[in-house]
Amino acid sequence: MKKLLNTVLSASLLAASFTAIAEEAKGPTLFERIGGEPVAREIVSDIWDNHGKNPIVKNRFQYSDPVYVKQKVYEIFAMATGANVEYTGQDMKTTHAAMNISETEFNAVVDDIMLALDENAIAQQEKNEILAILWSVRPDVVNSNVTTQALAPAKAQHAH
Ligand code: HEM
């Protein structure tokens, strides 16, 4: 019985130390590396300002409430970069589906975000990681009909 207890104890100690090593190896989250909440809020505010100056997308946000949109974008940004923050907005597909957003608009929004990262002196490594996150959201934001139409001629050529 004592032996069993010892085995169980050392197994759980081992597990605990593995967890500690894993935590250490993981290091700070992307959210922490960019400077946490104050920097993330500043980035979100700069994204909003950049959209307002960007002729490709500014009309999209003309009737939007800046306080509301900034809060939701802060939440989703914080969550996606590893902060313990809950996103309380609508999912990306539901939010953008009816807007008929083009690839050009999507790229313009990504440009505004990259500019905001530069404005906050975010390093290349962190910029790359954020760009990858944005790219992963693309299928939910860009209107799939627009993409399908763009690809249709190429598909037709290969049909026969
Ligand atoms: C990776 C890209 C994008 C992300 C992560 C994103 C994120 C968000 C979030 C979190 C919201 C608030 C959702 C809610 O109301 O609960 C939102 C709303 C919105 N987004 Fe996006 N978005 C992206 C791209 C775009 C693009 C390309 C456009 C068009 C140019 C766009 C236009 C809008 C508009 C017009 C709203 C509604 C604002 C309002 O409620 O008044 N978004 N987006």
Image (tube, helix red, strand yellow):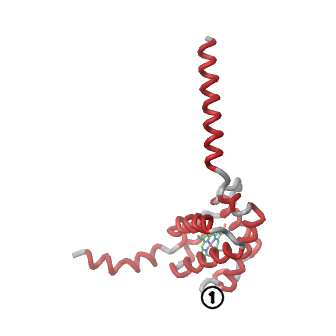
Image spot of residue 145 (x, y percent): 45, 76
Q: Amino acid at mark 1?
A: Pro
Q: Secondary structure at mark 1?
A: loop
Using the image as rendered, state which of residue 93 and residue 52 is in the foreground.
Answer: 52
**For mark 1, does the 10 Å Cα neighbourhood hold few (<14), some (14 to 19), or many (20 or more) residues?**
few
The relative height of residue 57 versus residue 40 in the rendered view (above or below) is below
User: On the image, numbered disc 1 is attached to which residue?
Assistant: 55
Residue pictured at 40% horizontal, 80% vertical: 150
The relative height of residue 22 versus residue 130 in the rendered view (above or below) is above
Residue pictured at 56% horizontal, 74% vertical: 98
User: Residue 77: which quarter of the image?
Assistant: bottom right
Toward the bottom, the furthest residue is: 55
Using the image as rendered, state which of residue 98 and residue 7 is in the foreground.
Answer: 7
Toward the top, the furthest residue is: 1
Using the image as rendered, state which of residue 124 and residue 141 is in the foreground.
Answer: 124
In what quadrant of the picture does the C terminus appear? bottom left
Give ligand 1's quarter of the image. Answer: bottom right
Q: How many marks?
A: 1
